[in-house]
Amino acid sequence: MQELKSIYEITKNFDGFLFDAYGVLVDEQGLLEGATELLSHLESIGKPFWMLTNGSSKTVADTVKRYRNMGLPFSVDNVITSGALLSDCLDQLTEPGQAIGVLGTEGSHQLVRDAGRCPVAITESKDFDILVIANQTDYDFVPALDAALSLAIDRIDRGLNFTVVLTNPDLFYPKGENRFGITAGSVSLILEECLKLRYGSLPPNRIIKLGKPFPPMFREAERRAGSKRLVMVGDQIYTDIKGANDYGFQSVLVATGLTGREMLDSLDDSLKPSYFVNHLKES
C-alpha cells in the first residue's frame, strides 16, 4: 500500500477512475471538499470516470439529476448503480411480467418496472417468489420484514422457490460527521441470519447480491471502459476496496467516509488498498 499526499499523484496512471458516492464525493450534508475539482481535472486531462454506487433507491436518471444538481459532472453514461443491474439479473430468474416483491422506495419499484416486471409491496401480496431488497426506507420496517420472513419460511418449508435479490449490499453508510445509518444490506442480513438459524444453511443463490463487492458492477465498469486498467476510489474496505481488489482493479481508500488510516495495519493484505489518501483535495 502506498500512502499518497494527494490523489493527483496518480491521475495519469490509469485508463479510468471509478468513484463511490457516499463518503467519497458526497455525504448527506452535500459535496465533500475536492470532489468537483478532481473530476474537472480528470476531464481536463482526458481521463474518463464513472460513479459506482450501491444506491438503488432511485432510477439512474434520477440519480444523475441529483448529483448534477449538486454540481458533479455525471450523465447516464457514466453512472453505474446497483439498481441498474437488476434488469439483467431478473432476466435470468423470471419471465417478463412476473410479480416481484420489493422493499424500497418508489424509485426502487420503478427499477423493477423498468426491468419489465410488476413490483408489489410485500405486506399487500404473497403472490411472488422473488423479493428485491433495494432500500431501508419508505416502508413500515418491522411489519414488512416480518412479512418477508414469514413468506420465505412458508415457501421453503413447502419446497418452493424463494429468492432474495439484494441490490445494495452495504450494511451502513456515513450521513455526516459522526453520523451513520443502516442500508439495505443490513435489512437483508436480518432475514439471512433468521433463515440460517431455522435451516442451518441456505442453498446457493438463495440470496443474490448485485452491488459492490460482488463482480457484476465491476464487470459492467470494465465493459464500459473497454479496459481493466482502472482504479476504484472508495471509503469502505469490504465493498469498494475488497471488490476492486478481487476483480483485479487497483484501489484507493479515501479517509473521508467510513474507514480511517488506523484500521489498515490490522488488515489482511488482500483487503488493503493499493493507495491511501486522506481526502480528494489537490494538496
Image: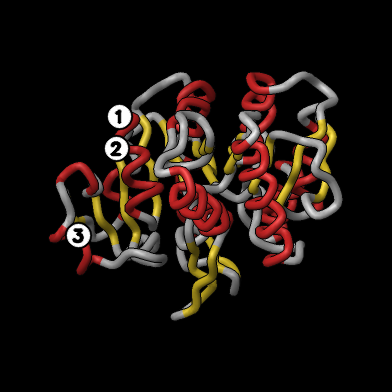
Comparing 199 with 206, the one in front is 199
Displayed quadrant of residue 11: top left
Q: Residues within 10 Å of mark 2 (few under 14, many from 20)?
A: some
Relative to 173, say whether 128 is above or below: above
Q: Where is mark 2, residue-wise?
A: 245
Left or right of 50? Residue 12 is left
Q: Is residue 219 left or right of residue 246?
A: right
Residue 59 is left or right of residue 195, and the answer is right
Question: Measured from the top left, where is residue 224 in percent x and y?
Answer: 53, 24
Query: Badge 3: few (under 14), some or many (20 or more) residues near its Cα, within 10 Å?
Result: some
- Disc 1 is placed on an element classified as loop
Q: Which residue is mark 3?
A: 264
Q: Is residue 212 left or right of residue 124?
A: left
Outermost front residue: 158
Residue type beneath disc 2 = Asn
Residue drawn at x 33%, y 46% is 241
Q: Which residue type carries mark 1?
A: Gly
Q: Which residue is mark 1?
A: 248
Q: Secondary structure at mark 2?
A: helix
Amino acid type shown at disc 3: Leu
Position of the C terminus by quadrant: bottom left
Quarter of the image where one finds residue 248? top left
The relative height of residue 246 versus residue 235 in the rendered view (above or below) is above
